Image: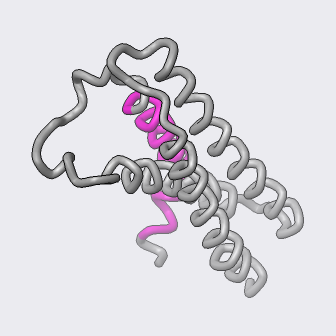
Amino acid sequence: MDLIKKPLSRIYIPVAWTMMVVILLAMPGNLLPSEQGFSIPNFDKVVHCTLFGALVFFWCFYFFSRPIIVKKLLVIFFIVFLCSSILGIGMEYVQKYFIPFREFEQGDIIADIIGSSLAYGICNIWLIEEKNSH
């Protein structure tokens, strides 16, 4: 666990992941891979779930590694979840109106929120429990 804790406690991990998510979602559709593996039905929903789940996890872990009391940490985790969900919704509208060859999909929004929710729940159970045990 300590091997993972140190790198994940640095700010550059969640910032870099957030930038990567925004860049991937802002890419024109004609630049996205079209290989056979990407044609699996609803594969993009799994990708959205993973991207936004990791986004919440990395930010929560960053804040977890700071000397913050549990009560405040719970609020921060919820704010991270909300920001991630809002980002997912907002990026769908950006794709709809500003990104060529991309479409607005409610399913992507749902996948973003599911990924964010799962990571939020895991962080609340695992990280808060660990914080309470110290």
Dominant secondary-structure state across the stretch colored magenta: helix
Q: How many marks?
A: 0
Looking at the image, residue 112 lies above or below residue 16: below
| Residue in the image at 77% along x and 55% along y | 78
Residue 96 position, x and y percent, is: 49, 20
The reply, left or right, for residue 11 in relation to residue 7 is: right
Is 25 contained in the magenta span? Answer: no
Spot the residue most to the bottom.
Answer: 133
| Residue in the image at 61% along x and 72% along y | 122
What range is drawn magenta here? 4-24
Residue 62 position, x and y percent, is: 61, 55
| Residue in the image at 66% along x and 73% along y | 127
In this view of the protein, which residue sits in the foreground, 118 or 23? 118
Looking at the image, residue 34 lies above or below residue 125: above
In this view of the protein, which residue sits in the foreground, 125 or 86? 86
Is 23 contained in the magenta span? Answer: yes
Looking at the image, residue 39 lies above or below residue 63: above
In this view of the protein, which residue sits in the foreground, 66 or 106? 106
